[in-house]
Amino acid sequence: MSWLNKLPNSIRSAGGLEWTLWRKLPLILLVGTVLPLAAAVALHLLGDAQNAAEARWLQTMDYVVAGVVIFHWTAVFTIAIGCAVVMLMKGPGYVADDPLELSHSDKPRTTAQTDAP
């Protein structure tokens, strides 16, 4: 038993920027992760960890790099959610197998009824 059935005569809208962006997201994620990590490795290779002030600065840069990478991942994930929502909305229409019958859908109420007994 399927949950949803396609509506008859429903059409898909043409894809747009969301598909272009969706296909580039893995590359964007990879580049945005590798570049800050490469910069952190370069700082550690070029820096002097024996000096206390420099070691503290390197540790601070490690925290900054971790924050930049996590922020980038969050931004890419948010963009992916947006792309998925747009793709779903542009897709064909669906209806449930067991639609809820409304008592007043064909005959709207003309008088106001209260819930109080």
Image (spheres, grey):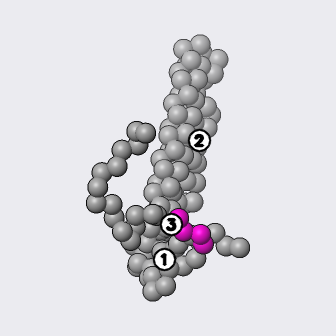
Which amino acid, mark 3? Glu
CA neighbours of label 3 inside 10 A, class few (<14), some (14 to 19), many (20+): few
Pointer 2: what residue? 37
Q: Is residue 39 above or below residue 50?
A: below
Disc nearer the start of the sequence (1/3):
1
Residue 56 spot, x, y in % from top left:
56, 17
Q: Is residue 112 toward the left or the right of residue 61 in the image?
A: left
Tell me the residue at 44%/67% (across/down).
89
Q: Are the two marked residues, 1 and 3, in contact with CB atoms closer than 8 angstroms?
A: no
Amino acid carrying label 2: it is Leu
Question: Disc 1 or disc 3, which is closer to the eye?
Answer: 3
Q: Could you tell me which quadrant the N terminus lies in? A: bottom right
Q: Is residue 24 visible?
A: no
Residue of label 1: 92
SS category of the residue bearing label 3: loop
Q: Which of 30 and 10 is in front in this view?
A: 10
Q: Residue furthest right?
A: 1
Asked which secondary structure carries label 1, the reply is loop
Question: In the rendered view, would you say 113 is above or below 15?
Answer: above
Q: Is mark 2 on a helix, strand or loop?
A: helix
Front-lying residue, 58 or 63: 63
Q: Which mark is residue 101?
A: 3
As shown in the figure, which amino acid type bears the numbered disc 1?
Pro
Q: What whole-number distance in Å separates the C-alpha atoms at marks 1 and 3?
A: 23 Å
Which tag, 1 or 2, sits closer to the chain's start?
A: 2
